[in-house]
Amino acid sequence: MNKSSLPLLQHLPRFFEYCDVEKGLSRISVRNYERFLEHFRLWLISSGYDKLLPDQLSDKLIWNYRLYLSRHINKISKQQLKKITQNYYLIALRGFLGYLAEKGVLSFPPEKVKLAKQISDRSVKFLNLDQIEKLLLAPNIQSLSGLRDRAILEVLFSTGLRVSELTSLNRDQFNLSVIRKSKDYELVVIGKGSHPRTVYVSERALSWLIRYLDKRIDRDIALFINFIRARNNSRRLTPRAIESIVKRYSLQQGLPANTTPHTMRHSYATDLLEQGVDLRTIQEFLGHRNIVTTQVYTHVTNRHLRDVHKAFHSGRKLKN
């Protein structure tokens, strides 16, 4: 293994290029690496380690960086970083060190970067059908923005799309002449990790999409747009804008304040499970690469299954 004469910081731009070109990561993934490793870069500079060589990175320095993360105060929330957030930064550092090892640069072994221990919270936040109905009925459909918002909420619950997948949709993916005759609709989206998958839009959601698109007179290619002003020559809604829309209507309807587009995704998956759809099928619907990710939903329905067992299992009728 070679000993690099370049300071550790000078390897960062090459690592980002490697993620983009050699690993073929999506632009979002590369930006996440850049964002998470920016903390590491600033910490090295502020600690006087801007000239640190890769082979000078030690257990003590890694420990000091972990202390820095654990005591860091988020400028927006004014709170310390959560353990799970700290781990995002440490996982990014592992990726960077793994790149150095692959390129033959002597440095700290990535597997020796220990993650922060965290209390496991695998609880899934979801809305029941009564709450979903309240949310869907919240927008004022007399306005174009209200029609858009209703279509957004209906599509989220109908498809279980991630918010980034929703905002990437274009109008030409929905041929009006075709969907007017459809009771359901299939389209392919590019999901997490640039993996394509098929999603299914219900007749109900299609009806709201038609009403919304019929009112559109602009030429913007995006399916969901901002009607107030254009930004960067595009009016496409951002994930943050969708999150604001969902939160606004949730608060308006007295629903949990932490309701997000991802809550809709959880609600979609939970509803399917409660209707008897098997976990493998849910995995396909959600676009999970690993069934372990989907298994987070199994405990959500435990209470429902227990109630069904109690109500319908005939063993309770047997004589003692």
Image (cartoon, helix red, strand yellow):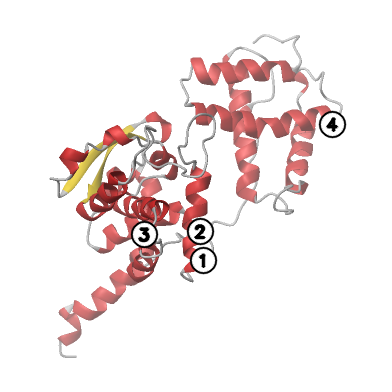
Q: Which residue is mark 1?
A: 251
Q: Which residue is mark 2?
A: 247
Query: Label 3 vs label 1: CA separation?
Result: 20 Å
Three-letter amino acid code at the position of disc 2: Lys
* First of labels 3, 2 by sequence position: 3
* First of labels 4, 1 by sequence position: 4
Q: Secondary structure at mark 2?
A: helix
Q: How far from the left and from the top, in percent, is residue 276? A: 22, 61
Query: Label 3 vs label 2: CA separation?
Result: 20 Å
Residue 202 in sight: yes
Q: Taking 24 as reference, is 97 left or right?
A: right
Three-letter amino acid code at the position of disc 3: Gln
Q: Quadrant of residue 128?
A: bottom left
Q: Residue at x 74, y 34 (%)?
A: 62
Looking at the image, the residue that sits furthest to the front is 217
Neighbourhood count class around disc 2 (C-alpha, 10 Å): few under 14, some 14–19, many 20 upward? many
* First of labels 3, 4 by sequence position: 4
Query: Label 3 vs label 4: CA separation?
Result: 55 Å
* First of labels 2, 4 by sequence position: 4
Q: Which residue is mark 4?
A: 46
Query: Label 4 vs label 1: CA separation?
Result: 42 Å
Q: Which is more toward the observer, 29 or 130?
A: 130
Looking at the image, the residue that sits furthest to the left is 181
Q: Secondary structure at mark 3?
A: loop
Q: How far from the left and from the top, in percent, is residue 31? A: 57, 29
Three-letter amino acid code at the position of disc 1: Leu
Q: Taking 249 as reference, is 60 left or right?
A: right
Looking at the image, the residue that sits furthest to the bottom is 320
